[in-house]
Amino acid sequence: MKELVNLEDLWKIYPVGPGVQALKGVNLRITEGEYLAIMGPSGSGKSTMLNLLGCLDRPTRGRYRLGDQDVSTLSDNELSEVRNRRIGFVFQSFNLIQQLTVVENIEVPLFYRGLPRRLRHPRSREMADMVGLGDRLYHKPAELSGGQQQRVALARALVNEPLILLADEPTGNLDTHTSNEIMVLLDELHSRGRTIIMVTHESHVAVHAERAIHMRDGQIESDTDADAENLGRHT
C-alpha cells in the first residue's frame, strides 16, 4: 500500500523554562487505508502529535512527509494550503459556523479553495447525503442534535477528498447511542478506503481502529493491533 505519513525522528520542544519536550524522536509510518488510534494519558504527547500531523504546528526537528511532500519546513501560507487540500479535521467540539446552514458549513473548504458556488453546492449536497443529512441542508447548527452536528463536521472534513482524516476525540461530546452512530459512520468510511487517524482516551472507541499506538512521555510506548486484549493492557 502507498505510504501517506512518514515521521522520522520527530521532536517538539516548547520554549518554556528549560524547554518542554512534548515529542521525543518519534518515528511512525501510516499507509493508505489504515485506521489508527492514538492513545495515552494526559501529557503523553498525543495532542502535540495530532497538531503536527494536521500541519497546525511545526516540529522542532525531524521530518514529516505527507504523501509525496515534505511538510516539515513549509511556510504558514504553505501549511494552510496543505491543511485545506490534503487534511480533513473532525473535532470534539464540532467547530461549525453557527450563522451558516448545513450545506454552507460543508462548503467552507471549497470556498477557501476558490471554487464557485455552482461547483461547491452540488458537491456539498452530495456529502450531506452521504452522512444522512440530505433532509437537513438548510438547518443551522443550533437546530441540530450533537450527533447531527458531528455528521456535518465529517462531511465538511471529507468534501475536499483529503489524503487523511484526523479525528480528535470525535465522540467526546456525545452520548453513548450517538457515539456509536458516529463510530459506525467512521467504520463505513474506513471500509471504503479512507485513511483515518483518531485521538481518543476511550478503549471502546479505539477498538474500532485496526491499529493503536500508545504514547507516554512524548514517545510511542507501543504499536499494536487495536484489539480489546492489547488495549486493555494500557487502560
Image (cartoon, rainbow, N blue to C red):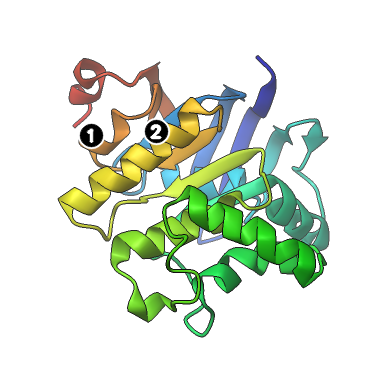
Residue 17 percent across, percent down from the top left: 50, 61
Q: Is residue 150 left or right of residue 61?
A: left
Q: Is residue 194 left or right of residue 86?
A: left
Which residue is located at x 41 percent, y 75 percent? Answer: 141
Residue in the image at 34% along x and 72% along y: 144
Above-or-below relation of 5 to 148: above
Task: Identify the residue at image location x=81%, y=36%.
Answer: 69
Give the percent coordinates (x, y) of residue 70: 79, 37
Label 1, secondary structure: give it: helix
Task: Tell me the SS state at disc 2.
Answer: helix
Tell me the quarter of the image containing the C terminus.
top left
| Front residue of this view, candidates 107 and 5 | 107
Q: Based on the displayed image, in which of its 4 quarters is residue 230 positioned?
A: top left
Drawn side of residue 118 relative to residue 228, left or right: right
Q: Can you identify the residue that label 2 sits on?
A: 187
Classify 10 Å Cα crowding around label 1: few (below 14), some (14-19), many (20 and above). Answer: some
In which quadrant will I find the N terminus? top right
Q: Nearer the viewer, residue 77 or 134?
A: 134
Residue 100 seen from this side = yes
For the residues marked 2 and 1, what is the alpha-carbon distance in whole angstroms?
A: 16 Å
Residue drawn where x is 54% and y is 80% of the image: 100
Q: Position of residue 96 (x, y in %)?
A: 48, 71
Q: What kind of residue is marked 2?
A: Asp
Instruction: Using the image, determine if residue 71 lies above or below residue 101.
Output: above
Q: Amino acid at mark 1?
A: Ser
Mark 2 or mark 1, whichever is nearer to me? 2
Label of residue 203 in the image: 1
